[in-house]
Image: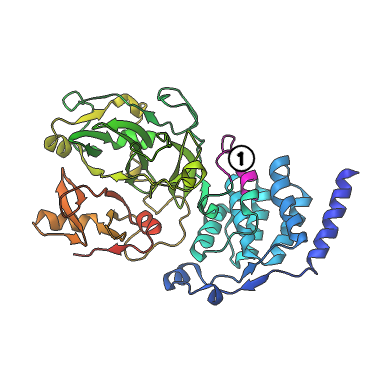
């Protein structure tokens, strides 16, 4: 009886939807000019709803997204609710559908969600690529989130993946539209639990290391990420970093947090000491979440989320204290060149690779980013390597690695404002005019240009 009553209530509500006042809409021109390359790739954006959802739509959204997630059920109620949502023509609701598509299994719900998203976006979407296509269009068109978006997203994510309850919180400076699931669980292990197994991408804390002479397991052409702090050098083999993706280490008397995002080809090194009073050293961990195909890291102590690419806390207590971690340079090079220029270097032990020898870089990303990123700045190819740095005036600049390396090898000077590039152990380092470290690193173009959308681009 309760089930039938619920259906009748839903049907009545859906009938009201046909007569309710839909939100005011803004077309693409009113929301701002859509770049030509976005129009060419994704087409014209749909008109977008403005203001709160009607009571009928709120009810439909709760049935389609919340009830189906919490109860683990998909039946006629959800089908009818999705029909009302699709009938609203409000593409903001496609953001919640995108989140559902990342987790929901089964042909019936996937088909229904895809059809509803197709109606909302004005696109004929393939069910096999629905999550990617829906999300890419929403990102490229910069479709706003619907009202109370985080409430829906929190239920969907935390119901499917326990451990995120303290991650999906109100406040901060985070755009929840950009956050998606990377397919792995959160690393919530205690500090210094490097060898404790988990169903996650397990960070390495206080890793052991050896001399270069003892590292006979490394081949000369193996890629390493080299870091120098206060005259002390250490190599972090890509083979290890692809498995760990996060290292909390101490080098040259300084504490470091070193994330490596395999998806955007970026190893970075952040100082996690000498922080403002009252801030404990962050213990950086992999959250299992992504933001435009960039790993989302968080602090184990406070559950504060960091923008991994920028080193800026964007939620939690550390965001309230406006903490931004300072970077030191990471040199991407081969082992032979690094140890030749830095014979005193240390290197992480082979055991941190957990017996695996992956090489994601040479195959997995061959056809473009494997997670949605929306549109990409067309000035360079998606996966071209760039050396990125930020000037003293706050201006971002990207140097295509290949052409910059060739120019430096020919003795040419490369400079931009206060930044000068120099060769370093087979890689490239950005220094200030007085030779001091600026904190540069290598990354794929799509990642650098999305996190620094106003970036300058050096050309030879």
Residue 230 located left or right of residue 449: left
Residue at 37 percent across and 26 percent down: it is 354
* Outermost residue, left side: 411
Question: Please, is residue 73 above or below residue 39 in the view?
Answer: above
Report if residue 160 lies within the magenta region.
Answer: yes
State whether residue 431 is above or below residue 239: below
Q: Residue at x 38, y 50 (%)?
A: 310
In this view, which residue lies farthest toward the front?
277
Q: Could you classify mark 1 by the number of other residues whose Cα lies within 10 Å: few (under 14), some (14-19), or many (20 or more)?
A: some
Residue found at x 50% / y 31% = 188
Residue 84 in percent (x, y) is at 74, 61
The reply, left or right, for residue 353 in relation to residue 124 is left
Location of the C terminus by quadrant is bottom left
Tally of numbered discs: 1
Residue furthest to the right: 1
Residue sitting at 39 percent across and 34 percent down?
Answer: 281
Q: Secondary structure at mark 1?
A: helix
- Can I make out residue 357 in this image? no
Q: Is residue 53 magenta?
A: no
Return the residue nearer the eye: 278 or 430.
Answer: 278
Note whether 359 is above or below 384 in the view shown: above
Quarter containing the N terminus: top right
Counting from the top left corner in percent of width and height, residue 207 is at: 32, 26
Q: Which residues are magenta?
A: 152-169
- Quarter of the image where one finds residue 451: bottom left
Give whichever of 362, 12 is nearer the camera. 12
Query: Residue 246's quadrant in the figure?
Result: top left
Q: Which residue is mark 1?
A: 158
Q: Is residue 305 left or right of residue 274?
A: right
Residue 233 in view here: yes
Residue 222: % across, % down: 23, 37
């Amino acid at each position: 009886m309760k089930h039938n009553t619920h259906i009748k209530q839903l049907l009545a509500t859906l009938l009201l939807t046909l007569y309710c006042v839909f939100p005011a809409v803004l077309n693409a021109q009113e929301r701002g000019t859509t770049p030509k390359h976005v129009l060419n790739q994704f087409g014209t954006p749909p008109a977008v709803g403005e203001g709160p959802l009607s009571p009928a739509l709120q009810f439909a959204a709760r049935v389609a997204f919340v009830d189906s997630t919490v109860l683990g059920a998909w039946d006629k109620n959800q089908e009818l609710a999705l029909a009302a949502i699709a009938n609203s023509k409000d593409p903001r609701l496609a953001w919640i559908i995108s989140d559902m598509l990342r987790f929901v299994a089964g042909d019936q719900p996937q088909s229904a969600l895809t059809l509803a998203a197709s109606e909302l976006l004005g696109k004929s979407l393939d069910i096999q690529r629905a999550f990617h296509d829906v999300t890419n269009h929403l990102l490229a068109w910069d479709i706003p989130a619907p009202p109370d978006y985080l409430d829906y997203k929190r239920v969907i994510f935390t119901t499917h993946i326990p451990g995120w309850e303290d991650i999906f919180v109100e406040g901060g400076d985070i755009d929840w539209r950009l956050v998606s699931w990377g397919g792995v669980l959160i690393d919530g292990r205690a500090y210094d639990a490097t060898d404790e197994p988990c169903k996650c991408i397990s960070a390495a804390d206080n890793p052991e290391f050896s001399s270069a002479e003892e590292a006979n397991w490394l081949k000369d052409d193996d890629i390493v990420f080299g870091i120098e702090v206060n005259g002390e050098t250490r190599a972090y083999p890509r083979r290890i970093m692809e498995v760990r993706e996060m290292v909390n280490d101490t080098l040259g008397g300084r504490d470091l947090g070193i994330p490596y995002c395999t998806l955007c080809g970026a190893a970075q090194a952040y100082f996690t000491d000498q922080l403002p009073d009252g801030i404990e050293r962050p213990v950086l961990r992999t959250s299992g979440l992504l933001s435009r195909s960039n790993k989302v890291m968080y602090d184990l102590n406070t559950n504060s989320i960091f923008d991994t690419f920028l080193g800026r806390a964007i939620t939690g207590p550390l965001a309230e204290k406006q903490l931004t971690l300072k970077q030191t340079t990471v040199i991407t090079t081969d082992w032979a060149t690094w140890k030749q220029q830095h014979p005193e270097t240390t290197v992480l032990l082979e055991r941190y690779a957990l017996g695996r020898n992956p090489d994601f870089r040479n195959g997995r990303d061959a056809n473009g980013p494997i997670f949605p990123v929306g549109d990409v700045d067309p000035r360079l190819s998606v996966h071209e390597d760039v050396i990125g740095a930020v000037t003293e005036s706050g201006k971002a600049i990207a140097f295509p690695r290949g052409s910059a390396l060739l120019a430096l090898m020919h003795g040419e000077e490369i400079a931009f404002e206060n930044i000068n590039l120099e060769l370093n152990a087979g890689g490239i380092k950005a220094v200030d005019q007085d030779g001091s470290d600026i904190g540069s690193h290598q990354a794929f173009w799509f990642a650098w240009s999305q996190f620094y959308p106003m970036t300058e681009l050096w050309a030879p």
